[in-house]
């Protein structure tokens, strides 16, 4: 592992993403062992899967993570939670089932029956506050610079809300809907302000297809056009890259 010396935020580069996954899983285990009511912010997508696999594979992880609470960054709007393409199904497959976490401990921004998106968003933000706030938020970066589903144009102080997905994001996520279900056009997402409220941020980006947006997020002036650029404002943020994602720095 090496550190990028001229980056505006602590930036670590590994040869193989699995190295980062192992390191992050061990850190999380230690943090949760020290603080059993730890609140973890989870991301979906391809990038965090190896970290979840490492976490699930740690010896005694079920005992350690029994008190964990989680909040996911986002969820498709209008998609049943048990649809295989939903982020809730993704999290159950990759992390919650292996850790035996009950649904009551894992919250997603989604509407309950009869609830409007505005009410659901307020309830989600209130639940985060009632839990004491997110201790550590895992994040990926979209190729267009989005974080969670805060697409380019999202405000720095945005909060949880219903958003429309861009065509490029829907196309990128289409492989998660192999049965031909159209990728939903909307999603509920934590806002950039919600994300920046977490006490720590661990941002992951792997692969050469992330190299250009990583460069822009670190080197161009922070702006709404590159939501990931706002991550630089956080005081406890770390960026984990592989050589390919770091190749334009
Ligand atoms: C996922 C999320 C997205 C992804 C981003 C990168 O909950 O909010 O912002 O982190 O689209 O996706 P992958 O990891 O598939 O490249």
Image: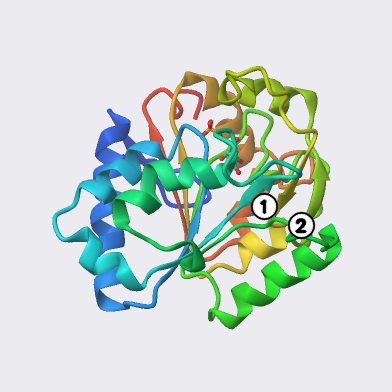
Judge from the rendering whether residue 232 lies leftward or rightward of residue 166; answer left or right.
Answer: left
Identify the element where label 1 is drawn.
helix
Where's residue 134, x and y in %? 52, 69
Say the numbered circle drawn on residue 133: none
At a point 76% along the width and 64% down the height, the residue shown is: 120
Say whether residue 5 is visible.
no
Say whether residue 4 is visible.
yes
Q: Say which of 235 and 158 sits in front.
A: 158
Is the residue indicated by label 2 positioned so its CB lies within 8 Å of ligand 1? no
Q: Are marks 2 and 1 in contact (CB under 8 Å)?
A: yes
Residue annotated with mark 1: 230
Where's residue 161, x and y in %? 79, 56
At a point 63% along the width and 75% down the height, the residue shown is: 127
Give the quarter of the figure containing the N terminus. Answer: top left
At a point 24% along the width and 61% down the height, the residue shown is: 62
- Mark 1, Cα crowd under 10 Å, few <14 / some 14-19 / many 20+, is many
Instruction: Establish if 98 lies above or below 172.
Output: below
Identify the element where label 2 is drawn.
loop
Instruction: Establish if 200 lies above or below 46.
Output: below
Q: Say which of 105 and 112 sits in front.
A: 112
Judge from the rendering whether residue 53 lies leftward or rightward of residue 163; answer left or right.
Answer: left
Residue annotated with mark 2: 156
Where's residue 172, x and y in %? 63, 23
């Amino acid at each position: 592992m090496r550190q990028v010396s001229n980056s505006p935020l602590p930036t670590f580069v590994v040869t193989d993403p699995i190295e980062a996954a192992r390191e992050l899983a061990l850190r999380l285990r230690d943090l949760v062992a020290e603080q059993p009511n730890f609140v973890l912010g989870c991301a979906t997508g391809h990038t965090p899967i190896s970290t979840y696999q490492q976490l699930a594979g740690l010896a005694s992880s079920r005992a350690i993570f029994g008190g964990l609470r989680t909040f996911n960054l986002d969820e498709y709007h209008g998609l049943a939670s048990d649809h295989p393409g939903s982020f809730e199904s993704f999290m159950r497959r990759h992390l919650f089932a292996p850790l035996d976490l009950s649904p009551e401990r894992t919250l997603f921004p989604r509407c309950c029956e009869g609830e409007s998106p505005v009410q659901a968003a307020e309830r989600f933000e209130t639940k985060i506050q009632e839990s004491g706030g997110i201790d550590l938020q895992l994040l990926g970066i979209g190729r267009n610079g989005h974080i969670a589903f805060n697409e380019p144009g999202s405000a720095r102080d945005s909060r949880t809300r219903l958003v429309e997905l861009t065509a490029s994001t829907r196309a990128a996520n289409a492989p998660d809907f192999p049965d031909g279900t159209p990728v939903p056009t909307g999603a509920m997402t934590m806002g950039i302000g919600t994300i920046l409220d977490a006490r720590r941020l661990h941002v992951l980006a792997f692969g050469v297809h992330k190299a250009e947006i990583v460069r822009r997020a670190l080197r161009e002036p922070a702006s709404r056009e590159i939501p990931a650029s706002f991550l630089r404002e956080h005081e406890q943020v770390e960026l984990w890259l592989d050589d390919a994602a770091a190749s334009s720095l």
